[in-house]
Structure formats: structure tokens, C-alpha cells
Image (cartoon, rainbow, N blue to C red):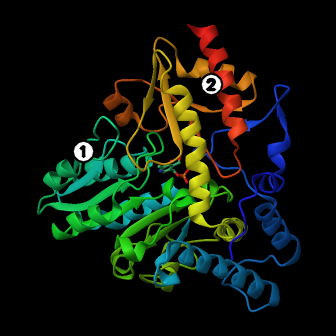
Amino acid sequence: MSRPLDIQAIRGEFPILSRQVNGKPLIYFDNAASAQKPNAVLDAMSDQGRTAYANVHRGIHTLANETTEAYEAAREKIRGFINAGSTNEIVFTKGGTEAINLVAYGLAGEIEPGDEIVLSVMEHHSNIVAWHFLRERHGAVLKWVDVDETGALDMAALEAALTPKTKLVAITHMSNVLGTVTDAREIVRLAHAAGAEVLFDGCQAGVHLDVDVQAIECDYYVLTAHKIYGPTGIGALYGKAAALARLRPFQGGGEMIEVVEKDRVTYNEAPHKFEAGTPPILQAIGFGAALDWLGQFDKADVLAHEQALYERAYEAVRGVNGLTVHGTAPGKGPVLSFSIDGVHPHDVAQILDRYGVAVRAGHHCAQPLMTHLGVSATARASFGLYNTLDEVDGFIEALHKARGMLI
Ligand SMILES: Cc1ncc(COP(=O)(O)O)c(C=O)c1O
């Protein structure tokens, strides 16, 4: 039985939401950059630190065992969250960026000059620059798939980009700028038919969608905790067991080895072979707590609420003279990116901040997309489950005032 979506009660669990900014109640619409954390997450980390903290996997004493249990329990929660088949397929990383770099580094030894990596123009720099490394250092060729005027991925172009040289398709599951949700199952079907593996950047999708990596059949899936009401400094890479077994380890150090001698080293099995050194233990436990917290609610209820927030905002701005909304693909996530003719998005964001409204302005780490859209930056309001329709109205009122001052 899921917990009802009582937004006022939920807001009460996020201490930061009751603060004021510039003398106004905070309206936090920067969730796509990082979400706020409920008491359940903050408490899980501080309780563990205060009552049962030691290093993991190293000791036979009680605290080490208790900490290891909590750390491994968090791995199990992530497994369940995306319905992976085994906890051995879940690698803790320090975030989404590190998870993608781990795969790029791990695959590097298999890349021959001319091998192709297919990306979309709406990728976050995390899912671009790691592949540029393979281009610069190993001669990989990056192939780019466009989005149409609504921001939907051009599936025909994706299919046309696949060749026998395609090693990997690395695509977002939800764009951090447009909100576009990609057809993950169909992308995998096309890529696998061409003999290529698929990595999904799920950094935005994780918090909004019901992700099932076994149903999608992807080879890799990337999550980051800080956008799922969890802490910073922790994320996860899902990799199919066979894929992780093939990948070269990313970093060398303690815990990722089997045997170390003066002239040879052998590695531990996945996931440990990718977790060199002391991991972010409390953060991993906080990640697990965030998934427990979010898991109380029905995902469909959460998404319906977030969509209602988006729709209210979209309906309010769509007719405004000189205002363009970027990303209107059907089924998109709750992210409203927009530009106003003749006005720099930073100025919009700065004035909104005076009214207590936190939105992001800039290229959103998606410069190829900005080029595609023909803008240098956009303003972005992104919604989370603790946001309210009244906050959307407050944002729209402040936006009209900002517009009045700037044009
Ligand atoms: C789509 C997307 N991919 C990757 C990242 C990077 O994730 P992290 O901040 O965990 O490194 C972000 C975060 O901004 C993102 O929005």
C-alpha cells in the first residue's frame, strides 16, 4: 500500500523548503540540477555515522560488519529500484559522470580507430566528453543523432547511424534540458540488431520514470543519487554481468584486487573490481535511504503530480509573446526550458531569484544542444514531487515581472 501524495506533509520533511530567499518563501525549481534531501536521508547518514560507522569490507569487528551490511543493503535497494537481476551488476560510483567515465575507460582497450560511438545532440557533457576521450586517444568516431522540432529523438536517423563499426550507443533516457524521454526499448532493439551495446544516461530519468533495466535490456544504465533526493558524491552504474566482466577496471587500489604481487595483479569480481579504495560509505547509505523514501509513493502518482506542475507552467507561458519553450515532445518529463527574445536567461534567473524563485540559466552542460537550438543558453524550471501548483503560479507571476523589467 503506497503512501498518499500529501504534498504539504511531504514538504514538512524537507527542512530547507521552509526557508526564505531574499525575504520571500523559497520556490525551488532547480530540481534537475540537484534535488533537496528529506530528513529520512539526512538522518540515515548522520545516524549511521553516529552509531555504526567503520570502513567497509575490511574488518571482522562489529562496526565494520554493521557498516558493510548497511552499504551492501543500499546496493540491494538500487538493484531493486531499477530491477537489475543481481547486486553484482550494481557498481557504486561518485555520481553519473564517474559512471560514464568508468565505462569509457573500461571499453578503451576494445576501441580500434574508426570504431563508432553514437550519441544524440541532446546529451549532457558527461555523456559526451568521456566519449571524446575515446575519439582523441583511440581514434573512435562520434556520430550524432538529431532531435526534431519538438525535441524527440530522430529514430530513423539513429537507425541510419548504426553500422557494423558501431560499438556503443550512448543516449540519455531523459534530457536535462528538453525533458525528452527516449524510447529505451526500441533504441536497444535497433542497436543490438546492429551488434552494438547501449548505455543510457538515466541521471534525469531515474527520479521520474519507472526504470526496469531487464525489460529495457540495456547493457549499461547510469544513475546519480543527488537528483533522486539523495546525497551528492554517490551514483551507480548498472552493467549486465557479462559487460562488467569484460570492462577493464577504472581505478586501481584497495578492495578491487584479488592478488597483488611485485610483478602481477589479479582483480576482484564485479562490482568490487570497480570500487577501488574506501567508497563514499555514508553517501551510499543515504542513497539507499532516498530510494526507500521515494519508494513509499506510487511512481505513477508522483509522475502525475510532476506532470500537472509542468502543464500548469507550460499553459501559462506558451502564449507569451517572444517566449519560446524548448522541448514539447509527447511524454516529456517535468522540465520547462525557455528563452525570451532579446533577453539573456541569466538576467531572467537573477530577477526570479529576487522573488525567491530558484531556476537555472545557462547551457546546462549541453552545448551541442544549444547549437542545435540556435541559442547560447536557456532558462530552466524543473519540478520535483514537493513542488506545488501555488509555487508554479508564484513563478509565473515573478516571470511576468521579470519580463516587464527586461523588455
Ligand atoms: C542528463 C545528465 N547526465 C549526467 C549528469 C551528471 O551527473 P553527476 O552530477 O552525478 O555527475 C547530469 C547532472 O547534471 C545530467 O543531468
Q: Picture coordinates of residue 397 (x, y %)?
A: 68, 23
Amino acid type, mark 1 = Trp
Q: Judge left or right: residue 88 versus residue 220.
A: right
Q: Judge left or right: residue 395 versus residue 156.
A: right
Going 34% across and 24% down the picture, which residue do you hit?
374
Q: Quadrant of residue 220?
A: bottom left
Spot the residue most to the bottom.
Answer: 60
Q: Is residue 61 above or below residue 318?
A: below
Residue, disc 2: 349
Q: Judge left or right: residue 48 versus residue 298.
A: right
Q: Pick whichever of labels 2 and 1 is earlier in the sequence.
A: 1
- Provide the secondary structure element on which disc 2 rests: helix
Looking at the image, is mark 2 or mark 1 nearer the viewer?
2
Q: Estimate how packed mark 1 is, as few (under 14), some (14 to 19) or many (20 or more) residues with alpha carbons within 10 Å.
A: some
Residue 25, numbered label: none
Going 22% across and 64% down the picture, which residue do you hit?
191
Q: Quadrant of the C terminus?
A: top right
Q: Picture coordinates of residue 190 (x, y %)?
A: 21, 64
Q: Quadrant of residue 42?
A: bottom right
Label pair 2/1, CB-CB below 8 angstroms: no
Residue 144, numbered label: 1
Q: Judge left or right: residue 106 versus residue 86.
A: left
For the residue pair 165 and 322, the one nearer the viewer reads as 322
| Mark 1 close to ligand 1, CB under 8 Å | no
Q: Estimate how packed mark 2 is, as few (under 14), some (14 to 19) or many (20 or more) residues with alpha carbons within 10 Å.
A: many
Amino acid type, mark 2 = Ala
